[in-house]
Amino acid sequence: MIPRRLHSELTTALADSPAVALLGPRQVGKTTLALEVARTRPSMYLDLESEGDRAKLSEPELYLPQHADKLVILDEIQRAPQLFRSLRGMIDAGRRRGRGIGRFLMLGSASIDLLRQSSESLAGRIRYLELAPLDAGEVGRRRTDTLWLRGGFPESFLAATDGQSLRWRTDFIRTYLERDIPQLGPRIPAETLRRFWTMLAHQQGGLLNAAALARSLAVDGKTVAGYLDLLVDLLLVRRLAPWHGNTRKRLVKSPKVYVRDSGLVHALLGVADREALLAHPVAGGSWEGLAIESLIAAAPDGTEAFFVRTAAGAEIDLLLRFPGRRKPWAIEIKRGLAPRLERGFHFASETVAPERRLVVYGGTERFPLAEGIEALPLTELCADLASA
Protein backbone atom coordinates (compact mmCIF):
# COMPACT_ATOMS: atom_id res chain seq x y z
CA MET A 1 0.00 0.00 0.00
CA ILE A 2 1.58 3.27 -1.15
CA PRO A 3 0.23 6.10 1.06
CA ARG A 4 -1.69 8.61 -1.03
CA ARG A 5 -1.28 12.32 -0.43
CA LEU A 6 -5.03 12.83 -0.80
CA HIS A 7 -5.87 10.57 2.18
CA SER A 8 -5.83 13.31 4.81
CA GLU A 9 -7.59 15.80 2.54
CA LEU A 10 -10.34 13.27 1.84
CA THR A 11 -10.79 12.62 5.56
CA THR A 12 -11.02 16.37 6.21
CA ALA A 13 -13.50 16.88 3.37
CA LEU A 14 -15.78 14.17 4.78
CA ALA A 15 -15.66 15.93 8.16
CA ASP A 16 -16.72 19.23 6.58
CA SER A 17 -19.13 18.34 3.75
CA PRO A 18 -22.22 16.14 3.50
CA ALA A 19 -21.08 14.75 0.13
CA VAL A 20 -17.66 14.33 -1.45
CA ALA A 21 -17.00 13.35 -5.05
CA LEU A 22 -13.64 11.65 -5.61
CA LEU A 23 -12.97 11.86 -9.33
CA GLY A 24 -10.25 10.38 -11.49
CA PRO A 25 -9.55 7.99 -14.35
CA ARG A 26 -10.37 4.32 -13.97
CA GLN A 27 -7.81 2.14 -12.18
CA VAL A 28 -6.17 5.14 -10.51
CA GLY A 29 -6.88 3.86 -6.97
CA LYS A 30 -10.13 5.61 -6.02
CA THR A 31 -11.79 2.49 -4.59
CA THR A 32 -8.67 1.47 -2.65
CA LEU A 33 -8.41 4.92 -1.07
CA ALA A 34 -12.13 5.07 -0.27
CA LEU A 35 -12.05 1.65 1.44
CA GLU A 36 -8.97 2.70 3.41
CA VAL A 37 -10.89 5.73 4.73
CA ALA A 38 -13.93 3.52 5.39
CA ARG A 39 -11.97 1.38 7.85
CA THR A 40 -12.10 4.19 10.40
CA ARG A 41 -15.90 4.47 10.58
CA PRO A 42 -19.12 2.51 9.96
CA SER A 43 -19.46 2.36 6.18
CA MET A 44 -21.29 0.70 3.33
CA TYR A 45 -19.89 0.16 -0.17
CA LEU A 46 -22.07 -0.07 -3.29
CA ASP A 47 -20.65 -0.70 -6.76
CA LEU A 48 -23.02 0.72 -9.36
CA GLU A 49 -21.54 -1.51 -12.05
CA SER A 50 -22.98 -4.46 -10.11
CA GLU A 51 -26.56 -5.35 -11.02
CA GLY A 52 -27.22 -6.43 -7.45
CA ASP A 53 -26.10 -3.13 -5.96
CA ARG A 54 -28.00 -1.14 -8.60
CA ALA A 55 -31.13 -3.13 -7.68
CA LYS A 56 -30.74 -2.08 -4.04
CA LEU A 57 -30.87 1.53 -5.18
CA SER A 58 -33.93 1.19 -7.38
CA GLU A 59 -35.79 2.98 -4.56
CA PRO A 60 -33.04 5.03 -2.90
CA GLU A 61 -35.44 6.98 -0.68
CA LEU A 62 -36.42 3.69 0.96
CA TYR A 63 -33.04 1.92 1.05
CA LEU A 64 -30.49 4.58 2.01
CA PRO A 65 -32.29 5.99 5.11
CA GLN A 66 -31.82 2.53 6.66
CA HIS A 67 -28.09 3.31 6.67
CA ALA A 68 -28.25 6.88 7.90
CA ASP A 69 -25.55 6.20 10.51
CA LYS A 70 -23.01 5.06 7.92
CA LEU A 71 -20.75 6.55 5.30
CA VAL A 72 -22.26 5.41 2.01
CA ILE A 73 -19.66 4.86 -0.73
CA LEU A 74 -21.14 4.90 -4.22
CA ASP A 75 -18.63 3.61 -6.77
CA GLU A 76 -18.96 4.41 -10.51
CA ILE A 77 -21.57 7.05 -9.73
CA GLN A 78 -21.69 8.13 -13.39
CA ARG A 79 -23.67 4.94 -14.04
CA ALA A 80 -26.62 6.28 -11.98
CA PRO A 81 -26.77 10.10 -12.29
CA GLN A 82 -30.46 10.00 -11.35
CA LEU A 83 -29.34 9.40 -7.75
CA PHE A 84 -28.22 12.98 -7.29
CA ARG A 85 -31.75 14.33 -6.79
CA SER A 86 -32.51 11.69 -4.16
CA LEU A 87 -29.24 12.41 -2.37
CA ARG A 88 -30.09 16.10 -2.21
CA GLY A 89 -33.28 15.43 -0.25
CA MET A 90 -31.54 13.01 2.13
CA ILE A 91 -28.67 15.44 2.75
CA ASP A 92 -31.08 18.27 3.56
CA ALA A 93 -33.10 16.02 5.86
CA GLY A 94 -29.93 14.91 7.62
CA ARG A 95 -28.84 18.51 8.10
CA ARG A 96 -32.13 19.33 9.81
CA ARG A 97 -31.50 16.45 12.22
CA GLY A 98 -27.90 17.53 12.77
CA ARG A 99 -26.42 14.54 10.87
CA GLY A 100 -25.56 16.10 7.55
CA ILE A 101 -21.79 15.79 7.50
CA GLY A 102 -19.89 13.01 5.77
CA ARG A 103 -22.88 11.02 4.57
CA PHE A 104 -21.90 10.17 1.00
CA LEU A 105 -18.63 9.49 -0.81
CA MET A 106 -19.07 9.21 -4.57
CA LEU A 107 -16.41 7.74 -6.84
CA GLY A 108 -16.38 8.07 -10.58
CA SER A 109 -14.66 8.89 -13.81
CA ALA A 110 -14.68 12.65 -14.28
CA SER A 111 -17.25 12.85 -17.02
CA ILE A 112 -19.07 15.94 -18.22
CA ASP A 113 -22.41 14.36 -17.30
CA LEU A 114 -21.31 13.61 -13.74
CA LEU A 115 -20.10 17.14 -13.10
CA ARG A 116 -23.21 18.73 -14.62
CA GLN A 117 -25.67 16.49 -12.76
CA SER A 118 -23.99 16.90 -9.38
CA SER A 119 -23.47 20.64 -9.70
CA GLU A 120 -27.14 21.16 -10.56
CA SER A 121 -28.57 18.87 -7.87
CA LEU A 122 -26.02 19.18 -5.06
CA ALA A 123 -24.85 22.79 -5.36
CA GLY A 124 -23.51 23.89 -1.98
CA ARG A 125 -23.62 20.34 -0.65
CA ILE A 126 -20.72 18.62 -2.41
CA ARG A 127 -16.95 18.98 -2.54
CA TYR A 128 -14.84 17.70 -5.43
CA LEU A 129 -11.45 16.05 -5.04
CA GLU A 130 -9.28 14.74 -7.84
CA LEU A 131 -7.19 11.59 -7.46
CA ALA A 132 -4.43 11.54 -10.06
CA PRO A 133 -2.01 8.66 -10.75
CA LEU A 134 0.91 8.22 -8.36
CA ASP A 135 3.41 11.08 -8.49
CA ALA A 136 7.09 11.47 -7.67
CA GLY A 137 6.37 12.88 -4.22
CA GLU A 138 4.37 9.78 -3.32
CA VAL A 139 6.73 7.09 -4.63
CA GLY A 140 10.02 8.69 -3.52
CA ARG A 141 13.32 9.43 -5.23
CA ARG A 142 14.51 5.81 -5.58
CA ARG A 143 11.49 4.83 -7.66
CA THR A 144 11.13 7.99 -9.75
CA ASP A 145 12.79 6.41 -12.81
CA THR A 146 10.33 3.50 -12.64
CA LEU A 147 7.49 5.97 -12.29
CA TRP A 148 8.72 7.90 -15.34
CA LEU A 149 8.81 4.80 -17.54
CA ARG A 150 5.68 3.03 -16.30
CA GLY A 151 3.51 5.94 -15.21
CA GLY A 152 1.53 6.30 -12.01
CA PHE A 153 -1.40 3.93 -12.41
CA PRO A 154 -0.80 1.56 -9.47
CA GLU A 155 -1.09 -1.73 -11.39
CA SER A 156 1.28 -0.48 -14.08
CA PHE A 157 3.77 0.98 -11.60
CA LEU A 158 3.81 -2.13 -9.37
CA ALA A 159 3.93 -4.72 -12.17
CA ALA A 160 6.57 -7.44 -11.83
CA THR A 161 8.32 -6.52 -15.10
CA ASP A 162 8.39 -3.69 -17.61
CA GLY A 163 6.76 -6.01 -20.14
CA GLN A 164 3.81 -6.74 -17.85
CA SER A 165 3.47 -3.03 -17.14
CA LEU A 166 3.36 -2.19 -20.87
CA ARG A 167 0.75 -4.88 -21.51
CA TRP A 168 -1.41 -3.46 -18.70
CA ARG A 169 -1.21 0.05 -20.14
CA THR A 170 -1.95 -1.18 -23.66
CA ASP A 171 -5.04 -3.00 -22.39
CA PHE A 172 -6.04 0.06 -20.37
CA ILE A 173 -5.95 2.28 -23.47
CA ARG A 174 -7.94 -0.23 -25.52
CA THR A 175 -10.57 -0.64 -22.79
CA TYR A 176 -10.95 3.10 -22.35
CA LEU A 177 -11.39 3.67 -26.07
CA GLU A 178 -13.67 0.72 -26.81
CA ARG A 179 -15.78 0.47 -23.64
CA ASP A 180 -15.43 3.25 -21.08
CA ILE A 181 -15.69 6.35 -23.28
CA PRO A 182 -18.72 5.03 -25.22
CA GLN A 183 -20.43 4.30 -21.87
CA LEU A 184 -20.01 7.97 -20.94
CA GLY A 185 -21.94 9.10 -23.99
CA PRO A 186 -19.65 10.27 -26.82
CA ARG A 187 -19.91 8.21 -30.00
CA ILE A 188 -16.42 8.64 -31.41
CA PRO A 189 -14.74 5.89 -33.46
CA ALA A 190 -12.16 4.24 -31.20
CA GLU A 191 -9.46 4.27 -33.89
CA THR A 192 -9.95 8.00 -34.56
CA LEU A 193 -9.63 8.84 -30.87
CA ARG A 194 -6.58 6.58 -30.58
CA ARG A 195 -4.89 8.42 -33.46
CA PHE A 196 -5.69 11.77 -31.82
CA TRP A 197 -4.37 10.61 -28.43
CA THR A 198 -1.20 9.28 -30.10
CA MET A 199 -0.67 12.59 -31.90
CA LEU A 200 -0.84 14.39 -28.57
CA ALA A 201 1.73 11.93 -27.16
CA HIS A 202 4.09 12.66 -30.07
CA GLN A 203 3.78 16.40 -29.33
CA GLN A 204 4.01 16.01 -25.54
CA GLY A 205 4.39 19.46 -24.01
CA GLY A 206 3.96 21.28 -27.31
CA LEU A 207 1.73 24.24 -28.05
CA LEU A 208 -1.74 23.26 -29.18
CA ASN A 209 -2.10 23.54 -32.95
CA ALA A 210 -5.70 22.54 -33.51
CA ALA A 211 -5.58 23.30 -37.23
CA ALA A 212 -2.66 20.92 -37.82
CA LEU A 213 -4.34 18.18 -35.79
CA ALA A 214 -7.58 18.68 -37.72
CA ARG A 215 -5.78 18.34 -41.06
CA SER A 216 -4.06 15.14 -39.92
CA LEU A 217 -7.37 13.61 -38.83
CA ALA A 218 -9.34 14.97 -41.82
CA VAL A 219 -11.86 16.66 -39.50
CA ASP A 220 -12.66 20.29 -38.70
CA GLY A 221 -11.23 22.36 -35.87
CA LYS A 222 -14.43 22.19 -33.82
CA THR A 223 -14.28 18.38 -33.85
CA VAL A 224 -10.67 18.43 -32.65
CA ALA A 225 -11.67 20.81 -29.85
CA GLY A 226 -14.38 18.33 -28.84
CA TYR A 227 -11.91 15.43 -28.75
CA LEU A 228 -9.52 17.46 -26.61
CA ASP A 229 -12.27 18.60 -24.23
CA LEU A 230 -13.29 14.97 -23.73
CA LEU A 231 -9.78 13.79 -22.81
CA VAL A 232 -9.30 16.80 -20.52
CA ASP A 233 -12.63 16.14 -18.77
CA LEU A 234 -11.60 12.51 -18.24
CA LEU A 235 -8.37 13.72 -16.55
CA LEU A 236 -6.27 11.94 -19.18
CA VAL A 237 -4.88 15.11 -20.81
CA ARG A 238 -3.81 18.43 -19.28
CA ARG A 239 -4.26 21.75 -21.05
CA LEU A 240 -1.68 24.01 -19.37
CA ALA A 241 -2.79 27.61 -19.72
CA PRO A 242 -0.43 30.44 -20.73
CA TRP A 243 0.37 33.13 -18.17
CA HIS A 244 -1.89 36.15 -18.56
CA GLY A 245 -0.34 38.63 -16.12
CA ASN A 246 -0.13 42.33 -16.85
CA THR A 247 2.89 42.88 -19.07
CA ARG A 248 3.85 44.93 -22.09
CA LYS A 249 5.58 42.00 -23.74
CA ARG A 250 3.73 39.86 -26.26
CA LEU A 251 2.95 36.46 -24.78
CA VAL A 252 1.97 33.23 -26.52
CA LYS A 253 -1.76 32.64 -26.03
CA SER A 254 -2.07 28.98 -27.08
CA PRO A 255 -2.07 26.39 -24.26
CA LYS A 256 0.44 23.58 -23.93
CA VAL A 257 -0.97 20.05 -24.06
CA TYR A 258 0.29 17.04 -22.07
CA VAL A 259 -0.90 13.45 -21.82
CA ARG A 260 -1.02 13.45 -18.04
CA ASP A 261 0.47 10.01 -17.35
CA SER A 262 3.97 9.40 -18.69
CA GLY A 263 3.35 5.66 -18.86
CA LEU A 264 0.41 6.21 -21.22
CA VAL A 265 2.64 8.44 -23.39
CA HIS A 266 5.12 5.60 -23.73
CA ALA A 267 2.44 2.96 -24.38
CA LEU A 268 0.86 5.09 -27.11
CA LEU A 269 4.27 5.47 -28.76
CA GLY A 270 5.40 1.85 -28.26
CA VAL A 271 8.27 2.71 -25.90
CA ALA A 272 8.90 -0.54 -24.02
CA ASP A 273 11.86 0.01 -21.68
CA ARG A 274 14.24 2.59 -20.26
CA GLU A 275 16.82 2.20 -23.06
CA ALA A 276 14.18 2.83 -25.71
CA LEU A 277 12.86 5.81 -23.74
CA LEU A 278 16.26 7.48 -23.40
CA ALA A 279 16.76 7.17 -27.18
CA HIS A 280 13.29 8.46 -28.08
CA PRO A 281 12.61 12.11 -29.04
CA VAL A 282 9.74 12.24 -26.53
CA ALA A 283 12.06 11.70 -23.54
CA GLY A 284 12.38 15.40 -22.69
CA GLY A 285 8.67 16.17 -23.03
CA SER A 286 7.75 13.01 -21.14
CA TRP A 287 10.01 13.91 -18.18
CA GLU A 288 8.65 17.46 -18.22
CA GLY A 289 5.08 16.14 -18.10
CA LEU A 290 5.88 13.86 -15.16
CA ALA A 291 7.45 16.75 -13.26
CA ILE A 292 4.54 19.09 -13.96
CA GLU A 293 1.94 16.54 -12.82
CA SER A 294 3.91 15.74 -9.66
CA LEU A 295 4.40 19.41 -8.74
CA ILE A 296 0.77 20.37 -9.35
CA ALA A 297 -0.36 17.38 -7.26
CA ALA A 298 1.95 18.39 -4.39
CA ALA A 299 0.97 22.07 -4.43
CA PRO A 300 -1.63 23.42 -1.96
CA ASP A 301 -5.29 23.12 -2.89
CA GLY A 302 -6.38 26.01 -5.10
CA THR A 303 -2.95 26.57 -6.69
CA GLU A 304 -3.10 27.79 -10.29
CA ALA A 305 -0.64 26.45 -12.88
CA PHE A 306 0.61 28.24 -16.00
CA PHE A 307 3.56 28.40 -18.37
CA VAL A 308 5.20 31.49 -19.88
CA ARG A 309 6.43 31.97 -23.43
CA THR A 310 7.01 35.33 -25.05
CA ALA A 311 6.78 35.97 -28.78
CA ALA A 312 10.59 36.21 -28.75
CA GLY A 313 10.92 32.69 -27.35
CA ALA A 314 11.70 33.38 -23.68
CA GLU A 315 10.04 30.66 -21.60
CA ILE A 316 9.33 29.32 -18.11
CA ASP A 317 8.11 25.71 -18.02
CA LEU A 318 5.82 26.06 -15.00
CA LEU A 319 4.44 28.91 -12.91
CA LEU A 320 2.61 28.05 -9.70
CA ARG A 321 0.50 30.78 -8.10
CA PHE A 322 -0.63 29.87 -4.60
CA PRO A 323 -3.95 30.96 -3.08
CA GLY A 324 -3.68 34.38 -1.46
CA ARG A 325 -0.25 35.18 -2.92
CA ARG A 326 0.37 37.62 -5.74
CA LYS A 327 3.79 36.43 -6.88
CA PRO A 328 4.17 32.93 -8.31
CA TRP A 329 7.03 30.43 -8.19
CA ALA A 330 8.89 30.05 -11.49
CA ILE A 331 10.08 26.50 -12.19
CA GLU A 332 12.32 25.32 -15.00
CA ILE A 333 12.46 21.57 -15.66
CA LYS A 334 15.64 19.82 -16.81
CA ARG A 335 16.18 16.08 -17.19
CA GLY A 336 19.98 16.04 -17.07
CA LEU A 337 22.38 15.88 -14.12
CA ALA A 338 24.10 19.20 -14.93
CA PRO A 339 21.32 21.75 -15.46
CA ARG A 340 22.02 24.90 -17.43
CA LEU A 341 19.67 27.83 -17.81
CA GLU A 342 19.10 29.57 -21.12
CA ARG A 343 18.79 33.33 -21.37
CA GLY A 344 15.09 32.90 -22.08
CA PHE A 345 14.39 31.81 -18.49
CA HIS A 346 16.00 35.00 -17.15
CA PHE A 347 14.14 37.21 -19.63
CA ALA A 348 10.82 35.52 -18.84
CA SER A 349 11.51 35.88 -15.11
CA GLU A 350 11.92 39.63 -15.58
CA THR A 351 8.46 39.66 -17.14
CA VAL A 352 6.82 37.68 -14.33
CA ALA A 353 8.86 38.84 -11.28
CA PRO A 354 8.36 35.54 -9.38
CA GLU A 355 8.72 35.07 -5.65
CA ARG A 356 11.12 32.13 -6.14
CA ARG A 357 13.08 30.77 -9.12
CA LEU A 358 13.75 27.05 -9.08
CA VAL A 359 15.23 24.42 -11.37
CA VAL A 360 14.14 20.79 -11.13
CA TYR A 361 16.78 18.41 -12.45
CA GLY A 362 17.60 14.69 -12.53
CA GLY A 363 20.24 14.66 -9.80
CA THR A 364 20.10 14.04 -6.06
CA GLU A 365 21.64 17.18 -4.48
CA ARG A 366 20.21 20.59 -3.73
CA PHE A 367 22.44 23.56 -4.54
CA PRO A 368 22.38 27.23 -5.65
CA LEU A 369 22.67 27.37 -9.43
CA ALA A 370 22.90 31.16 -9.80
CA GLU A 371 22.05 34.23 -7.78
CA GLY A 372 18.48 33.78 -6.54
CA ILE A 373 18.07 30.44 -8.36
CA GLU A 374 18.13 27.03 -6.67
CA ALA A 375 18.48 23.61 -8.31
CA LEU A 376 16.90 20.63 -6.55
CA PRO A 377 15.54 17.12 -7.23
CA LEU A 378 11.89 16.68 -8.17
CA THR A 379 10.98 14.84 -4.95
CA GLU A 380 12.46 17.61 -2.78
CA LEU A 381 10.46 20.31 -4.56
CA CYS A 382 7.33 18.18 -4.12
CA ALA A 383 8.04 18.14 -0.38
CA ASP A 384 8.57 21.93 -0.36
CA LEU A 385 5.27 22.48 -2.14
CA ALA A 386 3.40 20.19 0.22
CA SER A 387 4.43 22.44 3.10
CA ALA A 388 4.10 25.78 1.23
Image (cartoon, rainbow, N blue to C red):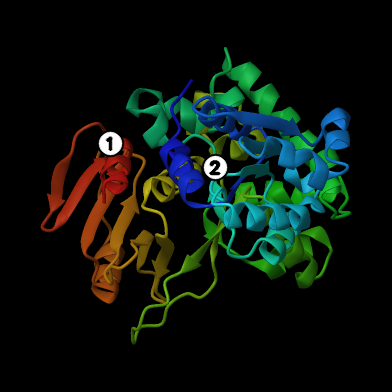
What label does residue 239 carry, if any? none
Q: Residue at x 57, y 14 (%)?
A: 161
What label does residue 337 carry, if any? 1
> How many residues crowd mark 2 within 10 Å: few (<14), some (14–19), many (20+)?
many
User: In the image, which is nearer the foreground, mark 1 or mark 2?
Assistant: 2
**Looking at the image, can residue 76 be seen?**
no
- The image position of residue 225, as x and y in percent, is 72, 66
- Horizontal side of residue 99 vs 242, given as left or right: right
Q: Residue at x 46, y 24 (%)?
A: 2
Query: Is 185 rendered above or below residue 40?
Result: below
- The image position of residue 248, as x and y in percent, is 34, 87
Q: Which residue is mark 2?
A: 131
- The amino acid sitting under disc 1 is Leu
- The image position of residue 124, as x and y in percent, is 58, 64
Please tell me whether mark 1 sits on a helix, a strand or a loop.
Answer: loop
> How many residues crowd mark 1 within 10 Å: few (<14), some (14–19), many (20+)?
few
Query: Is 60 rendered above or below residue 149?
Result: below
Q: Residue at x 54, y 58 (%)?
A: 206
- The amino acid sitting under disc 2 is Leu
- Depth check: 201 or 13 in front? 13
Q: How many marks?
A: 2
